[in-house]
Image (cartoon, grey):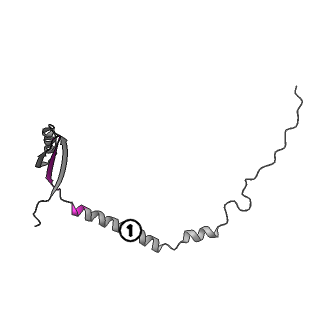
Amino acid sequence: MADEIKYEYKTVQTVRGTDGLVISKMQRDGWDVVEQSQGTLRSTLTFRRSKKPIPWPLVGAGAAVLAIIAIVIGSAAALSDGSEQKDEAAKPPAGGPRSLPLRRFRPRPSARPSK
């Protein structure tokens, strides 16, 4: 049962007379003709090819990496005591009561007589 070959199937409808082009194209892509039925204007072609096996070791490795990342993030969140939030709450606002920058007083230049 484990050695049984599994196939994927594809059905294509073509205009009658272009069957040879479609068959040769599909055979180049690895498909085999299973059935061919002729209609008055259209032909229906059924193709099959063996399914590629799923790379289970690669899928398992990806799942293991995702699980490790989730564990690391979860443990980091559990171990952090929220000290960043406490420190920010204890600090006064950045500008204090004076949020505008200080301006220095500059006297206006006196009117000088032009020469």
- 61 vs 37, left or right, is right
Q: Is residue 77 magenta?
A: no
- 79 vs 59, left or right, is right
Decide which of 22, 44 is in the foreground and name it.
44
Q: Hey, what amino acid is under mark 1?
A: Ala
User: Residue drawn at (55%, 71%), measured in percent from left and top?
Assistant: 83
Decide which of 32, 115 is in the foreground and name it.
32
Highlighted magenta segment, given as a residue range: 39-58
Is label 1 in a helix, a strand or a loop?
A: helix
Q: Position of residue 101 (x, y in %)?
A: 73, 53
Counting every numbered tag in the picture gives: 1
Q: Which residue is mark 1?
A: 70
User: Residue drawn at (67%, 66%), measured in percent from left and top?
Assistant: 92
Q: Position of residue 58 (x, y in %)?
A: 24, 61
Q: Position of residue 34 (x, y in %)?
A: 10, 50
Which residue is the extreme one toward the right? Answer: 113
Q: Is residue 42 magenta?
A: yes
